[in-house]
Amino acid sequence: MLESIEAFLYPIAVNINTYLSNYLLVFLLLGVGVWYTIKTRFVQVRYLGEGMKRVFGNLTLNGGKQEKGMSSFQALATAIAAQVGTGNIVGASGAILTGGPGAIFWMWLIASFGMATVYAEATLALKTRQIDEDGTIRGGPVYYITTAFKGRFGKFLAGFFAVAIIMALGFMGCMVQANSIGSTFETAFHIPGWIVGAILVAICAVIFLGSVQRLASVLEKIVPIMAGIFLLGGLVILIARIRYLPATFGMIFKYAFQPQAIIGGGVGYALKTAISQGAKRGLFSNEAGMGSTPHAHAQANVNHPHEQGVVAMVGVFIDTFFVLTLNALVIISTLYTPDGPLASCGAAAASETLNKTNLAQTAFGVVLGKDLGAAFVALCLLFFAFSTVISWNMFGKINAVYLFGKKAAPVYTIIALVFIFAGTVMSNDLVWELTDMFNNLMVIPNTLALFALTNVVLKSLQERERPKKKKKR
């Protein structure tokens, strides 16, 4: 019965994703990113330094319990937890397998413009958030969508977004994370997926039923540690393969513009595949423009929205240009170089040889050994995916409460836990396609609101720049 349902749903999800990724998603994401880059006069370049200072200037893994919401760093850690998940390991692997090494270039491009997009998202989230009498903060795209579009149309778009994010992250997204954990643990430790699922459900239930402050306290400790461990392991691989790094970067740029050499087919088809894979997996990785991370940044206790806007840009920068890039360099430098198992291997042939889940494990295993490489990736993916599940559950819950009221929170939590367990035993391909489909659908109402509220973002930025101009005089 389950297999027949999967067989029915899979081609439908693939067709929808193909259309959205090839004809709509790329233009919306790049469009809003370029739009805000120009309108803010390259805010991601001018204020990246300020963002870095705010994040690392007073870095602490114990931000203390906040009376309401989160500290600025706790909000960033929650956002990064959502960004740095399977999208960086499994997603990047899938992009390289299908779109070739050149897909990473398009991921970089998406992220460069996405930093301006996420600045706007964080600014609007803080501008439109609502604070209840008990100190509970409710903020995210549904609130700035209804600010941008009044009446029934605004309510429809907000409702559409809320349903999409509940399905994309709260339910299907958690299935992706659990599925990836289960797959890698089965490969590394031969532990059945259902056992991993049961343990995940038990741990997540304790955190899900707690307060926002409990969630923030967990993530502000897990995120820096997990990222540091993965980066250290990746650097060990790159040092061991340092003579292949020039060729690795060469392949990324070469196959970004000549992907037919490795994907096959005509130039147009290959280029479209490389770009769409980079865009689709880039979106899933850094989530800029998707409308997920604004839920975290809306919780930040800051003096001005601009302060969290520049911090939000750092999240995309760390996610893409550090974690994702390191993983991509490890994969390409070990598997696609002349002595690698996928050297000069077309995307179709590569997909038959390895899948996107064990590609990273195989890559790390080239230097660390098969068993140690598989175990290292499995443990890193456990922390990445676990932290992502925590963040995504919060994002979905905020929207469930928006749609159905506070009484819906416990029901939502129970359903989310069921999806987490189901993810460890269901088909990997179907889970990814369904997640991509709802991710893509989220982008539409979110980007429409971002375009409509451009003046609100620019006014907020000008408020911060005006004192500087006065000082110069």
Image (cartoon, helix red, strand yellow):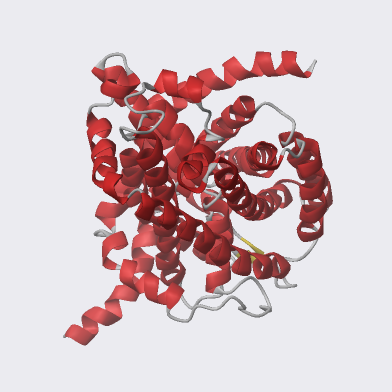
Is residue 36 placed above or below 257 in the rendered structure? below
Could you say where residue 127 lies in the image, as x and y percent from the top left?
50, 64
State the residue in front, 183 or 40. Answer: 183
Q: Residue at x 37, y 52 (%)?
A: 240
Is residue 85 placed above or below 418 in the rendered structure? below
Q: Residue at x 39, y 49 (%)?
A: 325
Q: Is residue 341 visible?
A: yes
Q: Residue at x 53, y 47 (%)?
A: 150
Q: Is 176 displayed left or right of 369 in the figure?
A: right
Could you say where residue 461 lies in the image, as x and y percent from the top left?
34, 67
Q: Residue at x 60, y 26 (%)?
A: 429
Could you say where residue 347 lies in the image, as x and y percent from the top left?
40, 23
State the residue in front, 203 or 131. Answer: 203
Q: Is 308 displayed left or right of 116 in the figure?
A: right
State the residue in front, 34 or 201. Answer: 201
Could you say where residue 264 lies in the image, as x and y percent from the top left?
32, 17
The answer to which quarter of the image holds residue 160 is: top right
State the residue in front, 408 or 343. Answer: 343
The image quadrant where one finds the C terminus is: bottom left
Q: Is 294 displayed left or right of 317 in the figure?
A: right
